[in-house]
């Protein structure tokens, strides 16, 4: 099998297009699989333009080695073989957006917005590294098996239709126009659906309108999240939701108990009064005891005047005769 730069062994072709072929290869030095982009000029390109194209690709590919971020396939190395640049990149496993759309049709709006935001992050990272993206399409966006949205083909020499090989790169507004066109091909209804204002706004000449379109894209991508402070109808099963739902449920129980206590008090009576204080209870007890002692003394004096023991007019029992007490047996003869 072909060995590039004495190190990268080509195994099989992964994709082929106008700008070249992407190979699955093995880095013999590090013992890992990589993707190798074989760049070639489109058929019929004049020789002078071909040289300019290869020079630009090599320059931008070397600059792309500085790009960091999960949204861009990392560039590991750039080799020149047979007069053409070969770009050694991270091998990302997954399906392209084009393959996904072909197999399952347009994406749901929220998923399409999530993919578009991932692409936008990659475009910004490439621009910050000085390697603006020149052409964007569903075949250049990978939906990786690990959940990432990865843009491939950065600095691979593809120019926008009609551009010369040495044409200056597009500005930031060009990135948003390309993103809007990609988004329009991803959703079912780009003209009147929820993302229609985004598709239109990303292509607007006014920077404020474009910025508003990006904010709307972020809103749609996060539309399934619960607004802060909203009490959910039921727990989703996630640990963080269970924690919040438990707090909300406890608050509801406390509120119900408060309502029960309020319902126990007749309307218009105001708060329930506190019970008598301890000192007042003791004083009332002592007063009652003094009354009883006084009655007993009075009864004893009266009985002494009449005489004690059996016989006429004597009490039939030695139990104290407390007025009103039941079962005392106190009777007068």
Image (cartoon, rainbow, N blue to C red):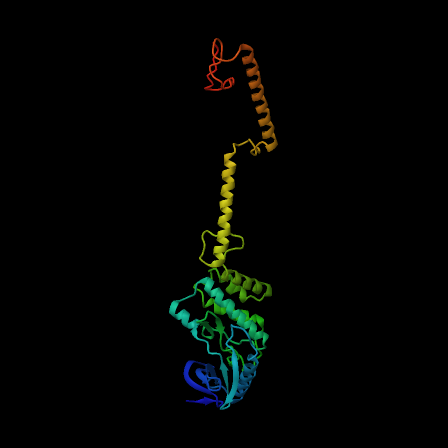
Residue beneath the point at 45% across and 84% down: 26
Residue drawn where x is 44% and y is 75% of the image: 93
Image quadrant containing the N terminus: bottom left
The residue nearer to you, when weighing 324 against 208, is 324
Q: Position of residue 102 (x, y in %)?
A: 39, 70
The structure residue drawn at horizontal position 47% and vertical position 55%, both measured from the top left corner, is 242
Q: Position of residue 206 (x, y in %)?
A: 59, 65
**Left or right of residue 23, residue 210 in this image:** right
Q: Residue furthest left?
A: 103
Res. 282 visible in picture: yes
Along the line of sight, the residue nearer the viewer: 262 or 32 = 262
Residue 161: % across, % down: 50, 77
Question: Taking 132 as reference, is 248 above or below it?
Answer: above
Q: From the viewer's side, name the closer residue of 10 and 32.
A: 32
Q: Visible in this render: residue 231?
A: no
How many labels were placed on the picture?
0
Q: Position of residue 20 (x, y in %)?
A: 46, 83
Q: Nearer the viewer, residue 318 or 155?
A: 318
């Amino acid at each position: 099998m072909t060995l590039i730069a004495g190190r990268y062994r080509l195994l099989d072709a992964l994709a082929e297009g106008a700008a070249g072929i992407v190979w699955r290869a093995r880095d013999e030095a590090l013992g890992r699989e990589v993707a190798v982009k074989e760049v070639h000029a489109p058929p019929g390109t004049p020789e002078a333009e071909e040289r300019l194209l290869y020079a630009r690709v090599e320059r931008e590919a070397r600059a792309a080695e500085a790009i960091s971020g999960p949204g861009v396939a990392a560039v590991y190395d750039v080799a020149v073989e047979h007069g053409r640049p070969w770009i050694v990149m991270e091998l990302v496993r997954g399906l392209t957006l084009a393959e996904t759309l072909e197999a399952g049709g347009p994406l749901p709006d929220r998923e399409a917005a999530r993919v578009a935001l991932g692409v936008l992050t990659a475009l910004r990272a490439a621009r910050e590294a000085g390697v603006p993206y020149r052409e964007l399409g569903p075949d250049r966006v990978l939906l990786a098996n690990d959940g990432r949205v990865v843009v491939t083909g950065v600095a691979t020499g593809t120019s926008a239709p009609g551009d010369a090989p040495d044409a200056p790169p597009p500005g930031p507004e060009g990135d948003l126009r390309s993103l809007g066109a990609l988004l329009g091909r991803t959703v079912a209804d780009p003209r009147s659906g929820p993302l229609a204002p985004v598709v239109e706004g990303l292509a607007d000449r006014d920077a404020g309108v474009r910025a508003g379109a990006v904010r709307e894209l972020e809103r749609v991508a996060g539309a399934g999240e619960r607004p802060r402070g909203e009490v959910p109808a039921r727990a989703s099963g996630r640990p963080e939701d269970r924690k919040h739902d438990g707090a909300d449920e406890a608050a509801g129980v406390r509120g119900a108990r408060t309502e029960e206590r309020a319902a126990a008090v007749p309307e218009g009576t105001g708060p329930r009064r506190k019970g008598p204080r301890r000192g007042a209870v003791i004083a009332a007890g002592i007063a009652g005891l003094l009354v009883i002692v006084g009655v007993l003394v009075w009864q004893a004096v009266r009985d002494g005047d009449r005489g004690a023991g059996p016989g006429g007019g004597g009490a039939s029992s030695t139990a104290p005769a407390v007025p009103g007490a039941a079962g005392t047996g106190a009777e007068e003869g």
